[in-house]
Amino acid sequence: GLIEQLQVVERAKEAFLGGRTRPLEFRLQQLKALQRMITDRQTEISTALKQDLNRSQYDTPLLELISLENEIALAIEKLAEWAAPRPVEKNLLTLTDEVYIQPEPLGVVLIIGAWNYPWALTLSPLVGAIAAGNAAVVKPSELSEYSALLLRALLPRYLDKDLYPVITGGVSETQELLKQRFDHVFYTGSSAVGKLVMQAAAQHLTPVTLELGGKSPCYIDKNCDLRVACRRVTWGKFVNCGQTCIAPDYILCEPCIQGRVVEGIRQTLLEFYGADPKCSPDYGRIINQRHFSRIMGLMEGYTAVLGGQSDASQRYIAPTVLKDVPPQSRLMQEEIFGPLLPIVTVSDMDDAIRFINEREKPLALYIFCSDKKAVKRMIDETTSGGVTVNDVMMHCALSSLPFGGVGQSGMGRYHGRHTFDQLSHQRACLLRSLGMESVNLARYPPQDRHRARRARLALRSPMIDFSKRTFVWAVTATVIAFGLAIALLVILLIASGLNCTCFYWRGFYY
Amino acid sequence: MSEKEFPQVINRLRTTFRSGKTLPEEFRREQLSNLLSLVKDNEQLIIDAVYKDLRKPKFEAVLSEIEMCRNELYCAIDNFSSWMKPEYVSKHLAVKLDDCFVRREPLGVVLIIGAWNYPFQLILIPLIGAIAAGNCVIVKPSEVSAATESLIAELIPKYLSQDCYTVVCGGAEETKALLENRFDHIFYTGSQAVARSILQAASIHLTPVTLELGGKCPCLIYGRVNIAAAARRLVWSKFFNTGQSCVAPDYVLCTRDVRDALLPFLRETLEEFYSKEPQTNLDLGRIVTDRHWTRLMDLLHKSRGKVVLGGESHQEEKYIAPTVLVDVEEDDVLMEEEIFGPILPILTVESLEEGIDFINRKEKPLALYVFSEESSVVNTVMEKTSSGGFCSNDGMVHMTLPTLPFGGVGASGWGSYHGRWTFETFSHRRACMLRGWALERLNVLRYPPYTDNNLSLLCWTASAKKSWPSCSVM
């Protein structure tokens, strides 16, 4: 209940303040334990996912576990590097000082997971939280019920029970949890709830990371390999039954290729899921009845050109494509988060750019086009959390790329080192000595012109003037000085006799 | 400009932003150079304005308002084009042939709310980064420092493009009205109380924020230490700008012995710096308003500590002498909130651990200072505490280095800036992956119908690091 929740958070705080997350060895040990949990329990995790989302046994490792394992492996490999002090450039005043940025843990981080990739989206931030030396309260989504309960059972068996507790519950439990003070709140979910999370965190001036969503546009240019484009789009759209924050939400293309796009998708669907996707073990289901009804409602009034069938008892919606969808339709107002793929026609790439810019900044933008210049222009003239060109979702798969939204699609970023940095405080450190007081004298009162000038010089930054003229002069002077030094050396050698210094040539003469 | 005009102004800036005017490198360079000219041409006017607002001595004005801005401008002008460049990232096997990079993009229309204690710098430095990052900006200087506010309102339209950068003046009411509108980032310097309401307003539009707040910056003096030098640096950083700095050492923690050794040096230093008659000395500033003066005097009167240095004041002049108190306890009124004035309480602790525990019982401060010549002491304090920034054996200077991120943590703030960090604050880091059409055979591994073989192969390519540890040739 509520009291329990308070106690759990308090315990995490105390455990953090006790200091055991500080040593890197401890963090590595926890990360390795997490790694073991995923490897040992893969079957149970797959079963839970099948019950939650009818996730196929292949989709589980593919979509969730591989990336999680990679994140953990990367963190283990790089932890020492990430946690080390990062030196910075100095000015004249600080020339003999130690100046660096020290990453530090924030304290207790609250991680609120999502239901569509319940393991990846809840545990990936946890990896960074642990690596950064924080304690973390993990709140998995109650909609992916089986996964939440399994996580609650498993995590304490592998990780430190006090530092990384799991709290399950619904909306009211989450609201209560958010009234408590955390040092950071990491939320993955919808923009609507994101606002509430930020508002709740505002009470305590708690910083947040919000990984939200939106309608990710997918522009298909008439100048591209349409066959391959359709395959890639189909894969990205219908994997996890369209319930992916970075799934291509809708297609933008010119009317002249619309037919071919539909045909390309139709062929690919046949290839992927067979004639009846309901019977394919690889095709998922909608998470619950509410979302099922919501998605079916979006389709109302439109005739699908592909798919359209459904079965409420199984929460099954066939892979569905709708064409010539009007921009003001309900289908185009909210994030679909389901297996409906509307095609909206635009007159050309400029029209597509305008269409995209009229709307909220999306989490992802997809561009299928073979013309490099046109691609560059489209990237330059739009904005989004991330972009993948000529494919979908792949920018999320590279951990060296920061993953996050902008505007309504979110704030903050993570994956790989970025999670570590996001859940750390980058503390600016300047270590001086009490000597060299004479340099400091210039800044003290009583003040006069001479002191003022010296103080200004000491603080001037950058120390070295990189303007072209100075650079040329510096290089020339160095070359001349070098030349003079060599000349001097040669003269000295001649004066003292060459033989005794020519070790290199000795071999030749003796 | 009245409140009713705010939405129009913001729309105008948004339209300009959408037209792409602020994107080209040349435009940003031109604006930054103009800003540099603004600072160079109007040095005396700026000095006069901050003198009028805070009776800020010319030296302090030059160092903290002019010089810091010039450094930041040179840093930005010299480097922003490299900051703008795409950052290529390391790739694993599956994407080896693709273009993977991070693009820094402007956010749109950003709001910068300044503070009164360094009224020019606290507007200009964020503005530099916002311009360099390609945004349109609304600047809202603090109304408390009225002379600087009008100077900024006069100069910015003269030097910078009026389509892209606007100054809005006003008080709490106007700020509230301004915040009802939607921005792409809000940069606020000021107090925690106001920060909460700003964060509430920002959450409605999911606007990211940077909050540069304050707190009580502790100054620990412990172990073997050259007391004379420590005293000078402490006095300088405490009484600079009459103690009205967010990173001024708020209070001192030391043992009884150190305190007794410190006091004569504090007296000596104060006399050296500000003479025996500080009230007539031109190197000492004044409190910004009557209200703030009254607040400080109130604290001084209510405090149960003993005044050992200073204590004099003059209401009309808004003058308070550099004042030091001893025998201040943890529950004293002076220890409740940030002092923000020329009053220095000295609290005694028996040991380093006690000092560290004391600090950790309070909110995380914006800065933490330690004076000690023993590196073990310095390291212990650093490891066992947290703060926005940390400086040993000096005060405040860590914020003058543009390569260090300046910002708070916890109650002292969210986000950081200065130098490149300002540019990053006002940019969106967009992850880009440009793939080709080839290697569709590789992609096949991820498509249904799923098979065991495909899965193992895919695992191998995506986690190539493990199997090819040193293969950087590909």
Image (cartoon, coloured by chain):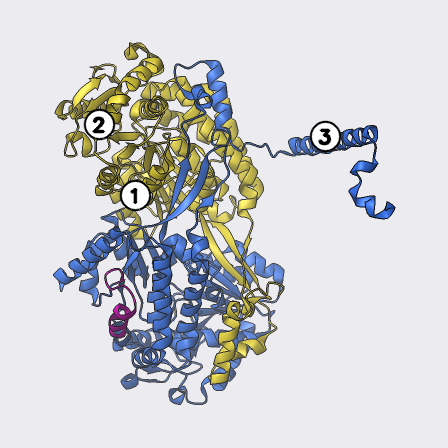
Chain colours: A blue, B yellow
Q: Which amino acid does label 1 sit on?
A: Thr
Mark 3 and mark 1 in contact (Cβ < 8 Å)?
A: no
Left or right? Give the position of A459 relative to B367.
right
Q: Mark 3 points at which residue?
A: A481
Q: Which of marks 1 and 2 is nearer the N terminus?
A: 2
Residue A280: percent from the left, percent from the top?
41, 87
Task: Say which mark, if any, is on residue B385.
Answer: 1
Residue A95: percent from the left, percent from the top?
50, 32
Residue A244: percent from the left, percent from the top?
39, 70
For the stretch drawn in magenta, the main secondary structure is helix
Quick one: SS at disc 3? helix
Local packing at callout 2 (Cα closer than 10 Å; few below 14, some 14-19, many 20+) is some
Which chain does the residue under circle 1 lie in? B
Q: Name the residue under label 2.
A: B256
| Quadrant where the image shows the N terminus of chain B | top left
Residue at 61%, 73% in the rendered image:
B438
Left or right? Give the position of B3 relative to A75.
left
Q: What residue type is labelled 3?
A: Ala
The reply to whether label 1 and label 3 mark residues of one chain is no
Q: In this view, does A238 lie above or below A353?
A: below
Which chain does the residue under circle 2 lie in? B
Give the CA distance from mark 3 to mark 2.
Answer: 58 Å
Judge by depth and name the residue closer to the eye, B125 or A123.
A123
Q: Quadrant of residue B54?
A: top left
Magenta stretch: give its range.
A149-164
Residue at 56%, 73% in the rendered image:
A256
Mark 2 and mark 3 in contact (Cβ < 8 Å)?
A: no
Quick one: SS at disc 1? loop
Judge by depth and name the residue closer to the eye, B223 or A329.
B223
Quick one: SS at disc 2? helix
Magenta stretch contains residue A154: yes
